[in-house]
Amino acid sequence: MTAHENDRLLTRFEVEQHFGIPKRYLETCVARGEGPPIVRIGRLARYRTKDIQEWITANTTGLKCGAKNE
């Protein structure tokens, strides 16, 4: 991705479409003060592409599907 694409502001719908993170989950995260960083523009919540990617990386556990957590 280019620097411009990394700074692009996405709606919750666009985050859901591009990254598969449900809009409702993002809304819940905002209410709890959790989740990926948001950019507030008045009442609107927007997400930078690079912030979503960094948040996904930071929350990747390294466990493989079907792996048992001992």
Image (cartoon, rainbow, N blue to C red):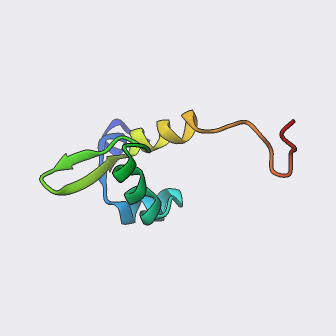
Name the residue: 34% across, 36% down: 3
Residue 52 screen position, x and y as percent: 44, 44
Name the residue: 20% across, 47% down: 40
Give the total of numbered labels. 0
In the image, residue 53 above or below residue 24: above
In the image, residue 50 above or below residue 25: above
Splitting the image into 4 quarters, where does residue 68 fall? Answer: top right
23 vs 7, left or right, is: right
Name the residue: 48% across, 41% down: 53
47 vs 59, left or right, is: left
Residue furthest to the front in view is 32
Name the residue: 53% across, 61% down: 20
Residue 48 screen position, x and y as percent: 34, 44
Residue 28 screen position, x and y as percent: 41, 57
12 vs 41, left or right, is: right
- Quadrant in which the C terminus is drawn: top right
Splitting the image into 4 quarters, where does residue 36 fall? Answer: top left
- Quadrant in which the N terminus is drawn: top left
Q: Foreground residue, 62 or 27?
A: 27
